Amino acid sequence: MGTPSNIKLIDENGLRLDGRGDEELRPIKITTDVLERADGSAFIEWGGNKILVAVYGPREAYPKHTQDIEKAVIKARYNMAAFSVDERKKPGPDRRSIELSMVISNALSSVVFLEQFPRTSIDVFIEVLQADAGTRIAGLTAASVALADAGIPMKDLIVGCAAGKVENTIVLDLNKEEDNYGQADLPVAIIPKTKDIVLLQMDGDMSEDEIDRAMDLAINASLKIYEHQKDALKRKYFSIAQEDEQ
Ligand code: UDP
């Protein structure tokens, strides 16, 4: 974090580099049922992010020592394609992707009725094809839709958004320049019905008041994104119903 002197992230009219106001979300589009061989799938386009999620399972967990005799285990794998970023990313897992896979697995585990599927794994592959900041939250948001698409019983979806601080202004949904050169980034994910927080991380510095304001912005935006998730699932069932009628 820390802005190089030649980059101005917010102009004199209060607009950001991509033309947004401080409380504005980037455009979001979610599609479900995009992969034939997966049990469930989703594709999310969120600003410049493009992320594909495939879900397999519940299926017998391998290797066997990973089985839990009382419940299913969610194994999410977050992966960034080598071509997804400006500077080619070395393929394969690194510390960041291992950490993100863990926090995403934990968040998803809080909504799935795991005890209905002992000894199984639910494998969730999150493939970031194009990255523009906010990929952990966009991946998690799409993953919960893909789980629902797979018909896996859940108490709710999971949805999130990041907020942060850029040039001393609290802003919603940071893009890559803001994430890289801003003062703070705070990704938040919630269970929308209960507003329970299932993922919360922070990079950079904010005061307590700034954190409260960033959390409020992120949670309000998450509730809007929840509508996109539900619409994506409704579109799927609407098209199935139409096919049945024909
Ligand atoms: N990024 C990159 N190379 C990397 C990791 C990240 O170019 O190896 C970029 C990418 O656009 C990513 C952004 O930096 O979306 C912010 O990364 P961060 O670790 O904050 O995670 P994210 O905001 O994507 O959840």
Image (cartoon, rainbow, N blue to C red):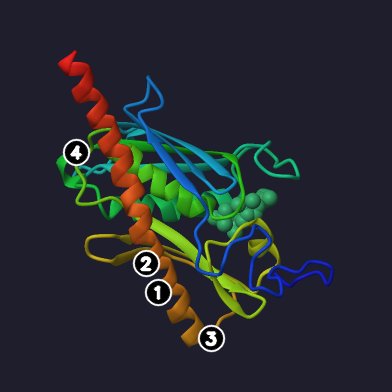
Element marked by disc 1: helix
- Looking at the picture, does residue 103 appear above or below residue 65? below
Residues tagged 1 and 2 counted as in contact (Cβ below 8 A): yes
Element marked by disc 2: helix
Q: Point out the tag, 3 or 2, that comes first from the N-terminus.
A: 3
- Looking at the picture, does residue 97 appear above or below residue 55? below
- Looking at the picture, does residue 244 appear above or below residue 179? above
Front: mark 4 or 3: 3
Q: What amino acid is labelled 1 in the image?
A: Asp
Query: What's the residue at 27%, 55% (across, down)?
Result: 110
Q: State the quadrant of the N terminus.
A: bottom right
Front: mark 3 or 1: 1
Which label belongs to residue 207? 3
Can the viewer see residue 203? Answer: no
Residues tagged 3 and 1 counted as in contact (Cβ below 8 A): no
Q: Point out the tag, 4 or 2, that comes first from the N-terminus.
A: 4
Front: mark 4 or 2: 2
**Alpha carbons under labels 3 and 1: distance apart:** 14 Å
Which label belongs to residue 117? 4
Query: What's the residue at 35%, 47% (across, down)?
Result: 228
Front: mark 4 or 1: 1
Element marked by disc 3: loop
